[in-house]
Image (cartoon, grey):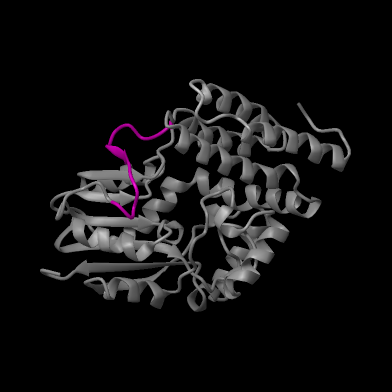
Amino acid sequence: MMFNESSNEKRESWNKKVNEFKSIDRSSPNAKEMLDNKFTEIYQIIYNELDQCEKEQAAKLIQPVVMIQDIKELDKKYTGLIKRGEALVFASKLQRTRRKMYEKYRHIPHIQHSSKRGKEYLAKLRLNHIEGYTLDIGCSDGKVAKALNEDIGNVIGMDIDIPEEHEKSIPLLKGDGCNLPFSNNSFNLVVYLNVIEHIPNPELSIKEVSRCLNDNGIAYIVYPNKYFPIEPHTGIPLISYFPAYIQDIMSKWLIGNTLNSYPYPAVQHFFNLQDVKVLFLRNGFEIIDSGSCELGDYLFPGLFNFIHRFLKKIRFYNICPHTLYIICRKKNNF
C-alpha cells in the first residue's frame, strides 16, 4: 500500500491502523499473532517511505523483534518502531532531503567501512597481546570485535541487540551495558567504540565495567567530540552546543523526532574530553592516555572529501577533533 491521498486522508489512514493496533486485546491467547499482523500492515506503510539502504536497516532492526514471545516486551518494541516510523511517513520535504544526504554522505560510508574504522581506533591501544579476556561493549555485528581478536585473542562481543547477520568466529552475547552478565574480575580489557554516548546511564555502565575488570585492567573508550561542528549521528550542525530543549526543537524540525527517539541509535549524551575523564576518575580509574582519532579519507565521498582534506590541511582537527579517546586503568582494590 502506498499513500496517494491528500495529507488529511493520509493521516486518517495512518491513525486508523495505529488505533486498531492499540485496540488489540493484549490478554488474548492469540495476542502475538494479532500484534504481528497489524504491525506488518503498519510496517508496510513505513517501508514504502524508505530508500533501499534504509529498507535493509529496517529489516535488520525488525528481525529480532518479531521473535519476541513476551507480549509486554513485544508491544513495547512495536510501539517504539511505530512512533519512529510515523516521523518518516509524515516527513516534510526538508526532513526527507536531510535524510537522503545523511544516508549518502555519512551513514552508508560509516557502515561500509566499520571494520576499517574500528581497526584505526584500535591502533591507539598499541597492544599486541593481552592476558585473559577482552569485552567489546556495543559490538553490533562483531566485525570490529573480530579485528581486535585477530590482534590480541580471547575477545567476547556484547550488544543489546545482535543482528541476524553477524560475525560467527567469536562469541557475541546479547546484554545490557548497564547490567553486564559477567562475574567480577572477568576481563583484562573492556572497549567502548562509539557506544558510551548511546548508553542511558554511562556512570552505571562504568561501575559495571569496573566490577568486571581485574585489578589494573584497561578500559578503552572512543566517542564523538561534543564540540565538533557537525553532530555525527544526525548530521545537524552545532546541535550539541545548545541546551536539551533547543536540541529537541532542532531535531524535531530536521528529523521529525527528538534525539532520544531518533530512528538510528538514540543519542543520549554529548561528551567532551574532560566529561569522560571525570566519569572514570570518580569510579576508580586512572587516565593513562587520551587524545583524538582522525577519521579516514575513505569516509567522505564527493564534495565532503574535498572539505575533509581541506580541514586536515589547515589543521582544523588539531583544534577541534571529530573523535576522542581515553585509555584508563582500574586501580587496585577499588
**Residue situated furthest right in the rendering:** 6
Place residue 220 in its image quadrant.
Answer: bottom left
Classify 168 as above or below 321. Answer: above
- The answer to whether residue 74 shows anywhere in this view is yes
Q: Is residue 173 located in the magenta-colored stretch of the structure? A: yes
Side (left or right) of 324 relative to 320: left
Query: For this rendering, which residue is in front, 299 or 237?
Result: 237
Residue name at image x 41 percent, y 46 percent? 115
For the C terminus, give its image quadrant: bottom left
Classify 263 as above or below 218. Answer: above
Query: For this rendering, which residue is in front, 2 or 141?
Result: 2
Which x, y percent locates residue 205? Answer: 32, 59
What number of labels is visible?
Answer: 0
- The answer to whether residue 238 shows anywhere in this view is no
For the stretch drawn in magenta, the main secondary structure is: loop
Residue name at image x 53 percent, y 57 percent? 297
Boundaries of the magenta span: 164-179
Place residue 23 in its image quadrant.
Answer: top right
Q: Is residue 303 located in the magenta-colored stretch of the structure? A: no
For the N terminus, give its image quadrant: top right
Which x, y percent locates residue 227? Answer: 53, 74
